[in-house]
Image (cartoon, rainbow, N blue to C red):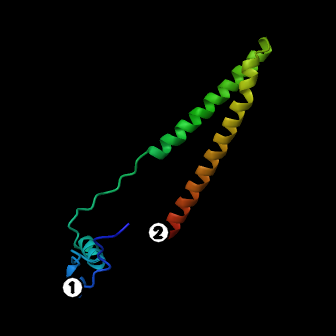
Amino acid sequence: MQIINDRFSQKSSNTEHDRKPQEQSAGGTDVSFFTSLFEGSHPTSTISAKPEGSLLLTEASKHLSNSRDGFAKIIRSTKKGIDVEAIGNYPRELHNAQLTTQLMVKCLAKTTQCIDKISNMQS
């Protein structure tokens, strides 16, 4: 196998002239980015608090309430007669409720910690 056209094997002193100049260097890009930030050409928008966090907690608490009601139904169904399917679902539902409770407690603790840090930074 023969290589017919190889750029590296050709000896030429015009290698610097063959290269295309970069349109803008990385430093120039950074400078223009930060300059545009300082100029304030973009209007600042006010940040509004969205109630998404409270909706998530509300949905999670509704899920726990539904789980509690489901546990009550499973327990009531065992008093009437043995329902194998209901008893089989009980451990899974109990595990899901326990994990949901632990997750909610952890999220609430982290949220409280973040609010505490923010309030300490502002004072």
Tell which tag, 2 or 1, sits nearer the viewer: 1
Whole-Å distance between the Cαs marked 2 and 1? 61 Å
Q: Where does the image place residue 78, in percent across and percent down from the top left?
A: 78, 17
**On the image, which quarter does residue 76 sit in?**
top right
* Image spot of residue 60 (x, y percent): 57, 38
In terms of image quadrants, where is residue 36? bottom left
**Going from the N terminus, do you reach mark 2 or mark 1 first?**
1
Q: Is residue 81 visible?
A: yes
Q: Residues within 10 Å of mark 1 (few under 14, many from 20)?
A: few
Q: Which residue is mark 1?
A: 14
Disc 2 and disc 1 in contact, CB within 8 angstroms: no
Q: Is residue 83 above or below residue 71?
A: above
Q: Residues within 10 Å of mark 2 (few under 14, many from 20)?
A: few
- Above or below, 118 against 88 in this view is below
Q: Nearer the viewer, residue 30 or 116?
A: 30
Kindly indicate the quadrant of the structure image that contains residue 37.
bottom left
